[in-house]
Image (tube, rainbow, N blue to C red):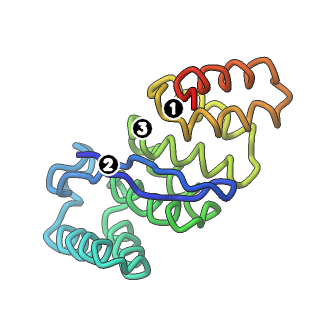
Amino acid sequence: MKMAFPFRIGGSLFFCLCLLLAPFARAAHSSQDEVTPHVQQLYSEAQAAQQQGDVTTAIAKYRAMIRLAPGLAPAYNNLGMLYFNAGRYAEAAPVLEHGLKLNPRMTTASTMLGLSWFELGENEKAEPLLERAAAANPSDNNVQMSLAHVLLALGRNDDAIRHLNEDVKRNPK
C-alpha cells in the first residue's frame, strides 16, 4: 500500500510516496528472528504515534526498534521517512543509507536518500540515486525536477534540459 507524505524542497510543497510497511512479522527474511513481540509492540506504538501526528514519539519508538532489531531494514526506512518528512535531511541520510545496506531494494528509501542528499547540497551523492528513481518512475515530477537541479549544479546542462523538456511534455500547463 502506498501513501503520500508532504515534504518541502526549495520552498515548494511536494509529495513523496512512501510505503507503509507490512507488520514487522512479515519483515525481511534475514531479520525474522529479530521480530519479537516487543518489536511488534513498538511498531504498533510508532504507527499510532504517526497517525496522531506525534513525530517525536514515533521517532523514539523506531529508534528503540532498531536497538532491539538492528537488521530490520523496514525500521530504518520508516525512521528515515520521519526524519525526511520533518526536513531533518542530515539525520535521514545515514539512517536511510544503513537501511539500504540491509535491503538495497527499498525504492522509497533510495528515493528519499537521493532527495536528502539534494537538500543537503550533496549533488554527487544525489545524482545516481535520483537517476534511478527517475528511471523507475518517470511520472514523478518531484524527482524529475530535483534531478534537473542536481544536473545543473553538476554542470550537466544538456542532461538537465532533457529532463526539464520531458517534464514540460508531461505537464504542459
Q: Which mark is residue 107?
A: 3
Amino acid at pointer 2: Leu
Q: Which residue is mark 1?
A: 133
At horizontal 62% and vertical 55% (from top left) the residue drawn is 12
In this view, 71 is above or below 161 = below
Q: Nearer the viewer, residue 40 or 167?
A: 167
Precedes in sequence: disc 3 or disc 1: 3
Left or right, 80 with reference to 172: left
Q: Image quarter for residue 40?
A: bottom left
Precedes in sequence: disc 2 or disc 1: 2
At horizontal 76% and vertical 50% (from top left) the residue drawn is 121
* Disc 1 secondary structure class: helix
Left or right, 76 with reference to 110: left
Amino acid at pointer 1: Ala
Whole-number angstrom distance, CA of label 2 to CA of label 1: 15 Å
Q: Which mark is residue 19?
A: 2
Amino acid at pointer 3: Thr
Q: How many neighbours does mark 2 have within 10 angstroms: few (below 14), some (14-19), or many (20 or more)?
A: some
Whole-percent x, y for residue 141 in the image: 54, 35
* Disc 2 secondary structure class: strand
Left or right, 134 with reference to 105: right
